[in-house]
Image (cartoon, helix red, strand yellow):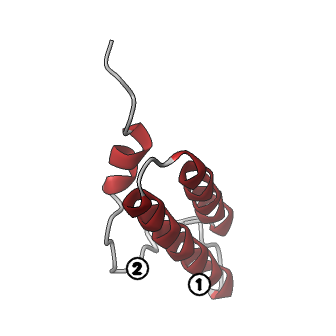
Amino acid sequence: MEAEFLRRFARQMRELMLRARTEAAREQLRIWAEEFDERAGAVDTQPGDNRAGDNRAGDHRGDRGIAVIATAGKRES
């Protein structure tokens, strides 16, 4: 993954923190933001073209939960 892509995700997590309704959601978003920043740093230190392939770390504590929190509070029409 490209480092800038990961940093963009980290930035989005921080923006969502401002709208999160619960402390638990804010904390999870903070953790994800830190993890995305760490992954971006790791990509920066890898030689070669880091955009090809899947460079995700083995720790996926909550990647699927991003969509859940991002849509929390939205009401169905």
Three-letter amino acid code of the residue under disc 1: Ala
- Check disc 2 and report the residue beneath it: 57
Q: Image point 45% across, 67% down: which residue? A: 27
Q: Nearer the viewer, residue 40 or 48?
A: 40
- Whether 34 is drawn above or below 71: the answer is below
Determine which quarter of the picture holds residue 8: bottom right
Q: Which mark is residue 7?
A: none
- Residue 7 lies left or right of residue 39; in this view the side is right
In the rendered image, residue 60, in percent from the top left (x then y), is placed at 33, 72
* Secondary structure under the numbered disc 1 in the rendered image: helix
- Check disc 1 and report the residue beneath it: 42
Q: Image point 59% across, 84% down: which residue? A: 42
In the rendered image, residue 75, in percent from the top left (x then y), is placed at 35, 23
Tell me the distance, in whole angstroms, between the alpha carbons under discs 1 and 2: 10 Å
Q: Is residue 29 visible?
A: yes
- Whether 24 is drawn above or below 70: the answer is below
Q: Check the image and name the residue furthest to the top.
A: 77
Q: Image point 64% across, 73% down: which residue? A: 49
